[in-house]
Image (spheres, grey):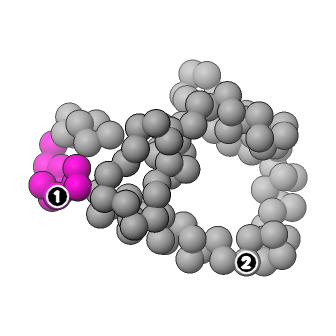
């Protein structure tokens, strides 16, 4: 979903807070992706525009994004280390949206 992508992009490595000013606008994300992604307005999900785009990135990932797995892992660990999550796991569905 778009909110999760915005948060992932806004994460500052070694930061303990998510700076809301760093959240990019979805329109900006779509714009810098130069037509490779679209946003489904009903589901609010951003996706690649065509399956051939995914196939291309699968074939060329090691060339264009050689450390993608490590970078994604670092961002995830950093995000989960943000102080808003100090309270631990969310035990009810309605608690999931509160930290975000």
With 66 as the anchor, is 23 left or right in this view? left
As for residue 57 lying within the magenta part, the answer is no
- Residue 18 position, x and y percent, is 37, 48
Q: Residue at x 68, y 33 (%)?
A: 28
The magenta segment is 83-92
- Quadrant assignment, res 39: top right
- Quadrant assignment, res 58: bottom right
- Quadrant assignment, res 5: top right
With 48 as the anchor, is 34 left or right in this view? right
Q: Secondary structure at mark 1?
A: loop
With 25 as the anchor, is 17 left or right in this view? left
Label 2–label 1 contact, CB within 8 A? no
Q: Which residue is mark 2?
A: 66
Placement of 67 over or under 10, stated as above or below:
below
- Residue 69 position, x and y percent, is 59, 74
- Residue 3 position, x and y percent, is 48, 37
Q: Which residue is mark 1?
A: 86
């Amino acid at each position: 979903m778009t909110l999760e992508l915005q948060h992932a992009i806004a994460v500052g490595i070694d930061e303990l807070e998510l700076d809301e000013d760093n959240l990019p606008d979805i329109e900006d994300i779509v714009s810098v992706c130069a037509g490779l992604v679209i946003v489904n307005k009903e589901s609010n999900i951003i996706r690649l525009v065509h399956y051939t785009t995914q196939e291309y990135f699968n074939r060329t990932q090691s060339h264009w994004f050689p450390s993608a797995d490590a970078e994604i892992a670092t961002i995830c660990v950093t995000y989960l280390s943000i102080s808003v999550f100090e309270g631990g796991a969310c035990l009810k569905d309605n608690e999931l949206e509160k930290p975000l």
